Amino acid sequence: MRRKFFEAQPFAPACEEVLELIGEVYAIEAELPGWAASTGEVRRAALAHRLAVRQQYSTPVVERIRQWALAQRAAPGSAFRKALEYMLKLWDGLTVFLRIPVVPLDNNHVERQMRDMVVGRNNLRRGRIPSGASGRRPGAVPRQAAGPQPRRVRRPGRRLRLEIFGAGEPTVDWCARSRASV
C-alpha cells in the first residue's frame, strides 16, 4: 500500500500526509519487542503486550489513515486515485494486524524469501549460471530433455505459518476466526 502512494507522490502532494501516518505505524511497530524466539508463558505475555500496544497506539493512527483516504478526491484514472482505491479495497486485510498479534505489519520478509526461491528456480530452468562462470554446466541436460517432471503440491501459506508459529505450535484456522467475527 505504501508503495502505491509513494509512486503517486510526484503527482499528488497530498500523499505526503498518508506516508507520514504510515511511517508512524511502522515506528510504533519498531518499538515492540520480538516474540518469535520466546516460548511458553513469555511468548503469551509478549503477544498480549503486542496486541495491547497495537490497539492503544496503532488503531487511532490507522483510523486517521482511513478517514484521510475517505476525505480525498482524485481524478479518475490518476495514480493517486488508484492508490486510494487499492487501499480501501484491501482495508480489511490491511488491518488484520490490529486484531491478531502474531500477524506482522507487512509481509516483506516472506516476499523476499519467495523471490529468492523463484529467481533460483528460474535460473535453473533457463540454464543460467552464476556470473563469473562461462557457458553451461558440463553435462547439464535441458529440463525438457529430461522428461516430464512430477507435479508438486504447493502450499504457499505454510512458510508464513511456520515462521509465525514455529514447527511445534498449532496453526490457527483463519477462516473460522473470520466467520466468527461476521
Image: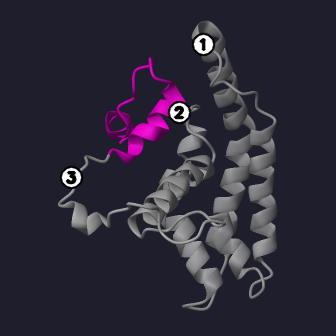
**First of labels 3, 1 by sequence position:** 1
Magenta-span inclusion, residue 174: yes
Label 2: which secondary element: helix
Q: Nearer the viewer, mark 3 or mark 1?
A: 3
Residue type at the position of mark 3: Arg
Quarter of the view holding residue 11: bottom right
The correct choice, above or below, for 29 with respect to 106 in the image is: above
Q: Residues within 10 Å of mark 1 (few under 14, many from 20)?
A: few
Left-right relation of 87 to 142: right
Left-right relation of 20 to 34: right
Task: Tell me the residue at 54%/34% (across/down).
Answer: 100
Q: Nearer the viewer, mark 2 or mark 3?
A: 3
Left-right relation of 101 to 60: left
Identify the residue position indicated by label 3 in the image: 151
Position in image of residue 9 (x %, y %): 76, 80
Position in image of residue 29 (x %, y %): 74, 40
Q: Which residues are magenta?
A: 155-182
Label 1: which secondary element: loop
Residue type at the position of mark 2: Glu
Identify the residue position indicated by label 1 in the image: 39
Residue situated in front as seen by the camera: 176 or 165: 165
Identify the residue position indicated by label 2 in the image: 163
Position in image of residue 153 (x %, y %): 25, 46
**First of labels 2, 1 by sequence position:** 1
Magenta-span inclusion, residue 120: no
